[in-house]
Image (spheres, coloured by chain):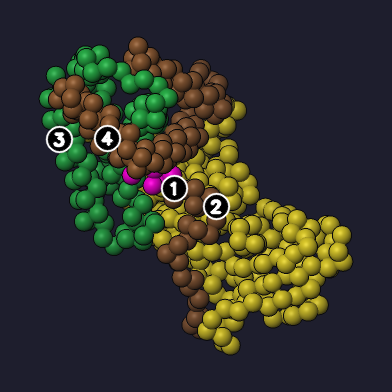
Chain colours: A brown, B green, C yellow
Amino acid sequence: MSQVRLYRPPVSLTWWLRKPSYLVFMLRELSSVFIAWFVAYLLMLVYAVGSGPGAYRDFLDLSANPALVVLNVIALAFVLLHTVTWFGLAPKAMVIRLGALRVPPNVILAAHYGAWLVVSAVVAWVVLR
Amino acid sequence: MTTKRSPEPLLWLLFSSGGMVAAMLVPVLLFLFGVAFPLGWLTAPGHDYLASVVSHPVTLLVLFGLCVLALFHWAHRFRYTLYDGLQLKRYRVPIGILCYGGAIAGSVVVALVLLRAI
Amino acid sequence: MPESITMEVWRYRPERESEPTWDSYEVPLRKEWAVLDGLNHIKDQLDGTLSYRWSCRMGICGSCGMTVNGEPKLGCSTFLTDYAPGPVRVEPLHNFPVIRDLVVEMGDFMAKLPTVKPWLVGDDEPDEDTEYRQTPVEMDDYKRYSMCINCMLCYAACPVYALDPEFIGPAAIALAQRYNLDSRDAGAEDRRDVLASAEGVWACTFVGECSVACPKDVDPAGAIQRYKLTAANKAVRDLLLPRGAR
């Protein structure tokens, strides 16, 4: 067979801008950075609480800093993107059976949202009581 | 067989568990302590009450699980973000050390901070 | 409805040009015409040098995969009127080397496919009188994955395959699962070395576009995630249980 000169299309460094779904994927993956930020923020809170009332007040003052509030609002948006996409994909990996019947994916999805609601309510109750 | 000793399944299980606990717990905690209290939408709990909640063994256990798994979730996803987004898969060894090493170091910090709260 | 529509077709003629170019053609816009009918009109009436693959014209042979306005599609199942007033941009499938015009080189998939043993693997030599009975519930487990027509739209949609051509890819993994989940099959352990490797399911980051692109609703992304769970469970068992108890 004679040699065929193949054309190999290059992969652009910004391939994830080509389609909205690719961009959402990239943002979803970047949400992990904000989850890591949340861990750091939570540790700051726990450290402050463990250090006494003064340190806790300092933490509350720091957390009201506009730059930090903006960062946390952005982080919350990314974390919500994580939650929604995570629950959306979970039924794809899970196949749950009750006897011979397969639990439909939207029931698994609804169960995730239900559990989220309950967990959030319990946490809010414990913190705000 | 090399594939059977691959760390990927274990790393993926840590990533998945971290993704699930983060999806469930992070939004409400971040909303309360990052947005609602700082902006005065809700009144932040007093120090004594919060200190008693944080030092409760169940809280410590939940926070430890949440923080460690969330860090491994970050490590796994961020590794693939660097592979796919920046096309850096050729540097997979340093990236792996950075991500999972970071998660391990972070877990030690988590343990130290939580032990101090007891 | 306008009488005609412009089709912009990606051209690559290796004996003439080193870089691809675009050619524009005016084709009649008819409500029953798919993109493939437009290409056939070009080849018959306007420019006989255009090269592309096609066969059945009814969405089952999997030959006419191409990129239509940026999305991987079957040319025969994508209607020109959905793109009116145009233009319609037709390119070869992304993520594959191009031989000529819309014809891509799929040898890579053809080499990977047999490595996942996409056939029924038996326990031992079947007895001539053996019947392999299967209930409808058992068949439901894998039926969806058996609908794959190897059209390669999922590979064209997959950014992981674009970035890492060693990735076994969506269709091959879905086809492996088609047999893994078949009650008559005993080959899951044979397929595991390939599926559970770094270039198998673990390379997938669940972009999910393969399942969006699939014209047969196979859901390769779901098949891959299910296998990740299976492989992780197996790995934990290998780690914890003594050999005999697995």
**Host chain of mark 4:** A
User: Are the residues under badges 2 and 3 in a single subunit?
Assistant: no
Vertical side of C144 occupied by C1: above or below: below
> Which of the marked residues, 1 or 4, is nearer the chain's N terminus?
1
Which amino acid, mark 1? Answer: Leu
Dominant secondary structure of the residues highlighted in magenta in the image: helix
Q: Residue furthest bottom?
A: C16
Q: Residue at x 42, y 64 (%)?
A: A13
User: Are the residues under badges 1 and 4 in a single subunit?
Assistant: yes
Q: Secondary structure at mark 3?
A: helix
Which numbered marker is on residue A27? 1
The mark lying in front, picked from 1 and 4, is 4
Which amino acid, mark 2? Answer: Pro
Residue A36 visible? The answer is yes
Q: Which residues are magenta?
A: A27-34
- Check disc 4 and report the residue beneath it: A62
Which numbered marker is on residue C12? none
- Check disc 2 and report the residue beneath it: A20
Find residue C61 and report its image quarter. bottom right
- Check disc 3 and report the residue beneath it: B108
Q: Is residue C59 left or right of residue B63?
A: right
* Mark-to-mark CA distance, 1 and 3: 28 Å
